[in-house]
Image (cartoon, rainbow, N blue to C red):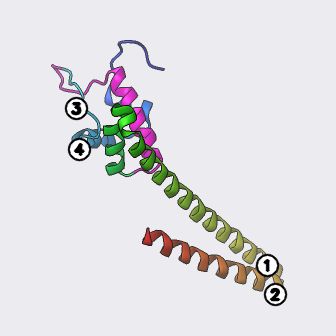
Amino acid sequence: MMKLNRVYTIAEAAKLSGLSESTLRYYEMIGLINPIKRNPSSKHRIYLEGDINFIIAVACLSATGMSIKDMRSYLKNRDQGAVAANEQIELLELQKQRLVSEAHFLELRKCYVEAKIEFWKAVVSGDAEKIERAKISANAITKELNLSRDLKQDN
């Protein structure tokens, strides 16, 4: 929990945001987050509450898998309010579509693992019919995974 007027070290900022220290430095270097003030004597970064709040917002965008380019656009637009609202919606809708696609691909991979588990259980039991069904199921999922991968690459 953050306290009023407190300053935070980079280690604390990393812990609060869930981003690594190297990611915080990188995001600052590329201008995704504003330059962080430095302690005059030690030159170590000192994060203020506003910095922490902003970094947490960036961490949330990053956690969705949003590209740095899209995060940059989103963060640039957020202070523009209604003027940039449609662009914000478009960025978020596109990210939502990417997440839906990733969830589908992940579900297919889970189904493949389940089919392979059934295959190996059938091998243990020596049930030739179950072995064949599991092979057919795994092959069908493999084809769907390849199709999904091809569609994903086309987008």
Q: Which mark is residue 122?
A: 1
The reply to whether dot 2 and dot 3 touch (C-beta < 8 Å) is: no
Is 84 on the left or on the right of 137, as rendered? Answer: left
Alpha carbon separation for disc pair 3 and 1 = 59 Å
Q: Which residue lies under the disc numbered 4?
A: 30
Q: Residues within 10 Å of mark 4 (few under 14, many from 20)?
A: few
Compare marks 3 and 4 and give the one earlier in the sequence: 4
Q: Which residue lies under the disc numbered 3?
A: 35
The reply to whether dot 2 and dot 1 touch (C-beta < 8 Å) is: yes
Q: Nearer the viewer, residue 31 or 73?
A: 73
Compare marks 2 and 3 and give the one earlier in the sequence: 3
The reply to whether dot 3 and dot 4 touch (C-beta < 8 Å) is: no
Alpha carbon separation for disc pair 4 and 2 = 58 Å
Q: Is residue 12 above or below residue 73?
A: above
> x and y percent of residue 123 in the render?
76, 81
Q: Is residue 41 magenta?
A: yes
Magenta stretch bounds: 40-66
Is label 3 or label 1 in front? 3
Residue type at the position of mark 2:
Ala
Compare marks 1 and 4 and give the one earlier in the sequence: 4
Compare marks 4 and 2 and give the one earlier in the sequence: 4
Q: Nearer the viewer, residue 93 or 46?
A: 93
> x and y percent of residue 141 in the render?
64, 76
Residue type at the position of mark 4:
Ile
Compare marks 3 and 1 and give the one earlier in the sequence: 3
